[in-house]
Amino acid sequence: MQPLHYSVLKNEVIDNLSVKEDGIYIDATVGYAGHAKEILKRCPKGFLYGFDEDENAVKASNEALKEVSNNFQIINDNFANMKMVLDDMGINKVDGIIFDLGFSSPQIDESSRGFSFMNDGPLDMRMDMRKNKTAKSIITSYSEDKLAEIFFKYGEEKLSRNIAKEIFHEKDYINTTLDLVEVIRKATGANYFFKNHPERKIFQALRIEVNDELEVLEKVLPDAINMLKSNGRICIITFHSLEDKIVKSIFKKYSEVNDLVKGLPEIPDEYKPLIKLINNKPILPTEKELKENSRSHSAKLRVIERI
């Protein structure tokens, strides 16, 4: 049987996390436990905390990790809340944190989730099925201008205004993912043989809006940095330029001397960098991995260490 999910850059993440046998680690996007299993194997005297909004992923990761050991806990929550959740449990400092911001293969391939423009399904796109906001509710309730804004901002789509206009006027007839695909293709003049699927960017934009992906990323990274012990590391895999831009910006901010005191002969401790960059350029998938998993083609791994 084929594995449920191919964990992108797995070896590179584990190598760069420098797992200690008695360390405490967080997999902020535990998914189907591909990375988490490898961490758990290497910290028999430590502990792993996993976070995921997706109930299916929580169930699957619990089963997968039980095969390794019992020194873990999976929490069904957004990683934006991990500091608050772990503070309440008395866990203030950890040795390492990983983020894999990509969607898992089961989520993409399961048509009932509505993430894929290749399969027909409901316009859902929620990671957390307990939430009310869906792709359908966005299409139904957002103004034409608001739709154009999110398509341009989150999808970086040049024809966002044309697409938003068509969707807004056809919204009462758009009920499934393939309904939406047809409207997007009509708005752009694309067809089934169009090389760069315009619907890819629109689906990305809707998914980001539904799950508030960029806002929670901006919120969690400073928390994650402050949770690290000295020499603790963060490994984060991004899959599109908007995520990577946020990661680069925050890592740059925390790895440099504060602008307020630059040039002073002695820098007060509170203004010194908190982290150092382990890799100035992102680590990319190998040719072998790209052949084995086409969905890894846009993945970038960045690593930092707490000073």
Image (cartoon, grey):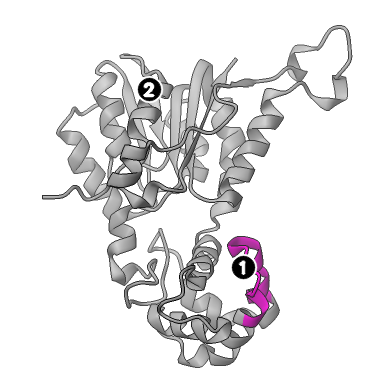
Q: Residue at x 42, y 49 (%)?
A: 102
Earlier along the polypeptide chain: callout 2 or callout 1? Answer: 2
Q: Quadrant of residue 247?
A: top right
SS assignment at label 2:
helix
State the CA–CA distance, disc 2 to disc 1.
Answer: 36 Å
Q: Quadrant of residue 181?
A: bottom left
Residue 261 shown in magenta: no
Total marks shown come to 2
Residue 178 pos. (x, y %): 39, 81
Q: Which mark is residue 130?
A: none
Q: Nearer the viewer, mark 2 or mark 1?
A: 1
Type of residue at label 1?
Glu
Which residue corresponds to mark 2?
15
Q: Residue at x 42, y 31 (%)?
A: 89
Instruction: In the displayed orientation, state which residue is furthest to the top.
Output: 266
Residue 298 pos. (x, y %): 47, 48
Which residue corresponds to mark 1?
157
Type of residue at label 2?
Asp
Q: Quadrant of residue 177?
A: bottom left
Residue 156 shown in magenta: yes
Mark 1 surroundings: few (<14), some (14-19) or many (≥20) residues within 10 A? many
| Vertical comparison of 242 with 269: above or below | below
Residue 77 pos. (x, y %): 41, 48
Q: Residue at x 47, y 43 (%)?
A: 79
What segment is highlighted magenta in the picture? 146-162
